[in-house]
Structures are given as structure tokens and as C-alpha cells.
Amino acid sequence: MAKYLKQAKPRPKEDLSAVRETVRQIIEKVREEGEAAVRHYSQKFDNWSPKSFRLSAEDIRAAEKKLSPTMKSDIDFSQAQIRSFAQAQMDHYQGFEVETVPGVHLGQKVIPVASSGSYVPGGRYPMLASAHMTVLTPKVAGVKRVVACSPPVKGEGPFYGTIYSMAAAGADEIYCMGGVHALAAMAYGMEGLAPVDMVVGAGNKFVAEAKRQIFGDVGIDLLAGPTEILIIADDTADPFIVAADLLGQAEHDPNARQALVALSRKTAEAAMAEVERQLRDLPTREIAAVAWRDNGEVIVVDSPEEAVAVSDAWAPEHLEVQTADWRYYLDHCINYGSAFLGEETTVAYGDKTIGTNHVLPTMRAARYTGGLSVGKFVKFVTYQYATKEASAKIGAVCARACDYEGMLAHGITCKIRTERWGS
């Protein structure tokens, strides 16, 4: 029986009606007024009203010159890892054709979307790694036109590291604008910016609501909430590492969620004590302490089977396994965004450098979807063709199927072919 040593505070249901209305108004204004509306909101929210929101080649070169050689090398290394894994994923998506009965041929083609928009958030931290994940991935998928947007440092302009990351990842157009108006501009267009077919990327609750409202007019990746981590640990786990990894996610946001599923009370208590010790000196304590206090959970279970059940019910964005036999959990856990197996890997690797994509499902969405990948940017489309003899045979069955449903005009299209080519 699972036992809680620490439980998250109950969260009152948030009233998002004001957020929804604000987002609706911004989107509508951008649809109607284009760049004038974008400029209005950019000035209002970011104190930013440049001559052009689109960055020139000169702007991009200037941003690159601000990078230290080490920073540039690290960005290039991270993008090489992400590109390599995305290409390996793409190599496993294949078209095919089969003959299901003599003369009937069915096939599948893999076609990338024509254009996509990548939103790279700024906010509390400049998330330049998001450029790797949301720009490079569609380029590997074969998307011909990738537009990238990121908000300015308030009143100052674009963050140079993010700009270089978007350019190095292959963005065809780069704009310095953020928030709801940036997503609306990508979805519906403005002067000099043609609409895209998909919009992807993380952001705050306003960005998430904007994606919800533009979905249907464009495709989206997923609706993300506050970040999450769940760690399964047994007595072989190092409490120091467990605590550090819990706090690593806690620093994201006061609403970030963390859970430790421990296979013994001893492990749980040691990790909890270590969290409190590390918090005393943590540079981002102001945020992490609130997230741990309000949203941290510690659960003691009696068996690996019970640990799997708790984890799958939680359906975490990030699952870390620090046990003697992590392969058991790889084989049995089914609900998670990405798994980090053994103490040798940590969520930060996936966030920044190791090669997997960090845009992942939250809020238990891992029950029904995975994270961002090249697969989000391709369409699996089907086709069919048949010989005259096969068409007559299929047509006879299909005509009767249409009649069963009362769709008589459908049936006629089948009977024509049966009468024309049947024996």
C-alpha cells in the first residue's frame, strides 16, 4: 500500500475566464490589424517596437559575435546530438505499398507539412535550448519553411544566444516578438509574414491558451502546463543525487511538480532531509522552495509493481529511475514523456544536450501522447489504386455496404464500376 510522507497542497481550480478573454482579444486584433496590433502589444508587454520585427542577416551575425567560443561550441554540440537523434527517428518513418487482394493496391506516403512556426519562450529564463528542439526538429523532418519567434529581453531586444540557436538550427525567418501576439502572427500572418501550417513550443498560461484557440486553423504540438518530474528510487540510490534532481525541476516555476516514489522509508527520509539541506544554499531557492513546499510529493511503496502503478497514475513529463534494475521500469512503465534511466542521466541532459526532445506532455497527457518529434511534422497519407477486375469485385461489396446505410448516391458510384467492369 502506497504511503505518502509528503503530499502536494490541493490546488483550487483556476478561473481562466479572464485569460481566455484576454487571449481572444489579442488574437482577434492581430487577425484584423496585422503588424499594427503586434506592434501595439509588443510595446505594451515588452517595451519593444523595432523598425522591423524580423531579424536581418546582419542582426543574426551580430548576435553570433556576442557568443563566447565555448558557448557557441556548446550550442553546436547540443544541436548535433538533437539532429542525430531526430534523423534516426525520421529514418524509421517509411512509406509502403501492399496488395491486399489481387488487383487492389494500398499505400502510405510520409509527407512533411509545408511550414511551421516555432515559439521559443523567454520569460524567467532565456530558453535557447527550445530553439534546438522546435526549429531543428521540423527541419530534419523536411519542413521547407520554419519561422521562429522569441520575445525580446524587455526593452533591450533579442537575446543573442537564442538568436544564434535559431539560426544555427536552420530557421528560415526569425522574429523578435513574444507572447500571444507572436503566436497569432504566425498563425494568421501579418505584413511580411505569411501564415504557417503548425505552431509549436512552450510558454506560460497565456501562450498555452493561445495555442488552444488557434488550434484548428493551424496544427499544434501539445498543450503544456508546469513542468514535472517523478523519481523512482530504491536503497541503491544516492540521496544527494535524488534531491538535486528534484530541485533541478523545482527551480523552473513555483507551480512545478515533483514526486519521489521510494521503495523504502529509509530512502524516502534520506532524500527529504537532503532536499532541505540543499535548499539552504540553492541559488534559485526563492522559486524551488515554493515549488517543493506546495507541489512536492514523497510516496513509499512496497514493491516495484506498486512503484510502476503509482508512476503510471501520475503520468509524469519526466521519469527518472534510480534503482539497481532500471530495465524493469523501462519494460513496465507506460505513461511518461521521457525516461532517464540510472543515476548517470538527469532531466537536464534531455532539456539541453543529450539529443531527445524536451517538449513533452504534462498534466497526465503522457497517458495518450508522446512529446515533440519529427513525427509531429509529417503526415501519413494513404493512397489506393485497383485493376478493373478488382474494382468490380470491391464495388459489389461496397454497393451493398452503402445500401445498408441508406447512402444511395454512394452506392451508385460503386454500381457504375461493377456494371462497367464486372464479368
Image (cartoon, rainbow, N blue to C red):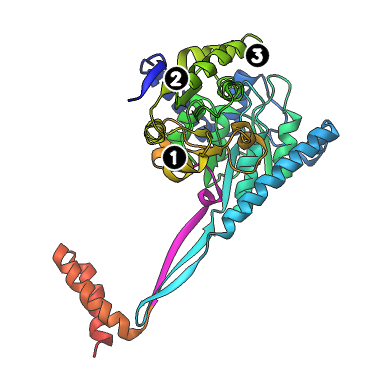
The reply to whether discs 1 and 2 touch (Cβ–Cβ < 8 Å) is: no
Q: Which amino acid, by three-letter code, is at mark 3?
A: Leu
In the rendered image, residue 372 lying in the magenta stretch gets the answer yes
Disc on res. 215 = 1
What residue does disc 2 label?
265
Q: Is residue 193 above or below residue 66?
A: below
Q: Is 100 on the left or on the right of 41, as rendered?
A: left
Q: Quadrant of the N terminus?
A: top left
Identify which residue is drawn at 42% across, 24% down: 20
Which of pointers 1 and 2 lies earlier in the amino acid sequence? 1
Q: CA distance from mark 1 to mark 3?
A: 39 Å
Badge 3: few (under 14), some or many (20 or more) residues near its Cα, within 10 Å?
A: some
The part of the chain drawn in magenta is 371-385
Q: Nearer the viewer, residue 23 or 8?
A: 8
- Residue position for label 3: 282
- Image location of residue 331, percent across then percent down: 45, 46
- Specify the quadrant of the image occupied by residue 402: bottom left
